[in-house]
Amino acid sequence: MISNKMIDLVKNSSVIRAMFEEGKNMAEKYGAENVYDFSLGNPSVEPPKEVKQAIVDVIQEESAMGVHGYMNNSGYEDVREAIAHSLNKKFDTQFGSENILMTVGAAGGLNVTLKTLLNPGDEVIVFAPFFGEYRNYVSNFDGELVVISPNTKDFQPNLIEFAEKISEKTKAVIVNTPNNPTGVVYSEKTIMAISEIMYKAQSMFDTSIYLIADEPYRELAYDGTQVPYLTKYYDNTIVGYSYSKSLSLPGERIGYLVLPTEMDDFDQISQAANVANRILGFVNAPSLMQRVIKKTLDVQVDVSVYDKNRELLYSKLTEYGFKMVKPEGAFYLFIKALEEDDKSFSAKAKEFNLLLVPGSSFGCPGYVRLAYCVDYEMIERSLPAFEKLANEYK
């Protein structure tokens, strides 16, 4: 018999993954060209050629133990030093190798962070809509998720409710910008306000509250939008980064944590995060990909491909009567459903072979998420289906 906690997790397994599997079944039934799967944020852009070449170069240049052996749980020191130097150049920070911990993607980094910080009953605040797996990550370590209700006007965080709900039990606040599922970038004004509220709470409750910046979409920003780097606004910030989107490498599971020296209890947290990396079973981040990342720090995917998709979908869907905030980053549209029940609306969309994810999965009922990291041609083929779906509600 599996554990009680796992019974609940299996029962409430990811809606996104379930729809992805359903999409494969529908493709077999109707033909892949007739199914319009916008469910999964799986990058459609190929990894840059420099990444492929770096993989070959690393295998040919390095000794077997240099590529495939164990290392410090934090990762290779030269890789961490190179990442720190790259961040310092981009964001005018002062990081060194001691501030970087290589992780098994952003998800691994978040779990390492929460394992490091949480005692049972500690609260973690998230802003709806939010990536649904945060619930499971917090639950993994017996924390309590506190959800700030969505501001559906512009999807910037609801700061009034945030100030009301932050408490002596709050241990961490997770911020995801550019945001999944809305594509909204939290403005500098928003980040400064979040920081001010958190500084006041720390002083009031005489405690340390950590801001966790979940940043897999940092490089995917459009129209010159600037994404604030959060360590510059709040001392107790931990940054979780992944190369899944910036280099189109989601399956390689490679990322890092930034643990700034100025945060409270830096030495303890750094040591504990190293131990958490090991005892959670990651041990260390994939060694080959660490070496590859060092060679490709100045490389990224062609974001214009996603931008082209964004512009086509936004213009056509608004023409059909759908309402949404135009995304500034990531590769998602968060569309207001044409009926109150977002799950019922997603089911209606499926009648036209459109796979959309209900917003209730992200803590925001009444909306659906559309991932536009897909082929442009598929988007073009899907437009008549979206128009027919809209007409069903006219």
Image: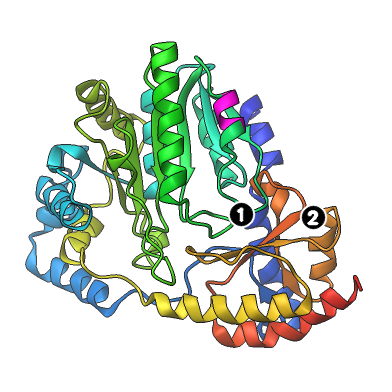
* Residue 164 on the magenta span: yes
Residue nearest the viewer, comparing 391 with 47: 391
Instruction: Point out which mark residue 342 bears.
Output: 2
Three-letter residue code for mark 2: Asp
Q: Give the image's coloring scheme.
A: rainbow
Using the rendered view, name the quadrant where residue 204 is placed: top left
The type of residue carrying mark 1 is Asp
* Image spot of residue 257 (x, y percent): 30, 42
- Secondary structure beneath disc 2? helix
Q: Give the range drawn in magenta.
A: 161-165
Identity of the residue drawn at 79% across and 55% down = 342
Q: Which residue is drawn at 41% across and 60% down?
A: 251
In the depicted structure, whether residue 210 falls above or below residue 364? above
Question: How would you classify the magenta stretch by its main secondary structure?
Answer: helix
Q: Is residue 214 above or below residue 9?
A: below
Q: Where is residue 53 in the image (x, y as percent from the top left)?
A: 20, 76
Whether label 1 touches label 2, CB < 8 Å: no
Judging depth in this view, the residue of 211 and 114 nearest the camera is 211
**Quadrant location, the C terminus:** bottom right
